Amino acid sequence: MTETAAAGLKERSEERTDRKGRSGPAAPPATLRGEAALLLVVVMNSFGVVLMLHSGSGISAISSVPYGFSEVFPVLSLGTWTYLFQGLLVLSLFVMRRRFVPQYLLSFVVGFVFGVFVDIHECWVSLLPQTLPLRVLYFLVSYLCICFGIALSNRCRMPIVPTDLFPREASGILCVRYSVFKIVFDVSCLAVTALLTFFCLGYVDGLGAGTILAAFTMGKVIGLMGDWLDRKVRFVSIFSEKDRKDGGRA
């Protein structure tokens, strides 16, 4: 082998070693439309809520209050009680802010669409088989769907479902860490549901082991998923573009 060839082999070997030993600069995050992300959130989280209930492990904490009212007052569907509850959350944010925030009102519209999708998913999810392994699978899928959907909605730069909006905005208003406030909010929803169904029906309805587990762990899992999303993607929407234009004119 000639000296030139040997030198070339040595250089290539050193390059391979260098690539293995050092990590290059991180790839820039991909840019996605917030409008598409919001649509995915509405479809995915409404599906997760219904699937968790179908798993037999209990309803998700964010939908436990509407579920309790739908059981006590079945004249209205779960979807209808969902957007009524979300309207109450939006009204609470107006009171906490002490001013009118247009995006909160748009959030109620998103909540209305979410409630419609809850009723749509109920029509077909109820037909799924319910063997024990499948019920465990349903819970895991629904849990991850809801966690990822909330993390996504908190970053999509669009008006989001009020049950996701309320913990995010209220934690900021009260200067409380989001993951902590989220757990407090979820546990409070479960307490209201337990008291409502116990005193009106004579037993606690809709709450199971999965509900309790989700209430105490979702805040942390949502935070972890959110950190991962921050590294991988950034979102733009008509609202972020409007803010840039307004800033430019100012």
Image: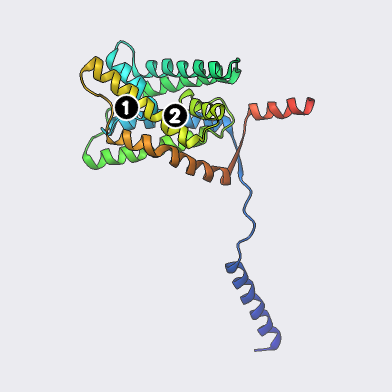
Q: Residue at x 42, y 28 (%)?
A: 185
Helix, strand or loop at label 2? It is helix
Q: Where is residue 58 drawn, in percent x and y?
A: 29, 31
**Crowd tier of the residue under label 2, counting other residues whose Cα lies within 10 Å: few below 14, some 14–19, many 20 or above:** some
As drawn, 201 above or below 29? above
Q: Residue at x 49, y 41 (%)?
A: 223
Q: Where is residue 90 drawn, in percent x and y?
A: 50, 18
As drawn, 161 above or below 76? below
The residue under label 1 is: 124
Q: Where is residue 96 drawn, in percent x and y?
A: 54, 19
Which residue lies most toward the right here? 249
Q: Is residue 121 visible?
A: no
In the rendered structure, which amino acid carries the disc numbered 1?
A: Trp
In the rendered structure, which amino acid carries the disc numbered 2?
A: Val
Of label 2 and label 1, which has the lower sequence position?
2
Q: Residue at x 44, y 23 (%)?
A: 114
Name the image quarter holding residue 189.
Answer: top left
The residue under label 2 is: 43
Q: Is residue 216 left or right of residue 197?
A: right
Q: Is residue 226 visible?
A: yes
As drawn, 149 above or below 13? above
Helix, strand or loop at label 1? It is helix
Q: Residue at x 64, y 80 (%)?
A: 10
Quadrant into which the N terminus falls: bottom right
In front of the other: 16 or 153? 153
Quadrant into which the C terminus falls: top right
Name the image quarter holding residue 182.
Answer: top left
Q: Where is residue 159 drawn, in percent x and y?
A: 56, 25
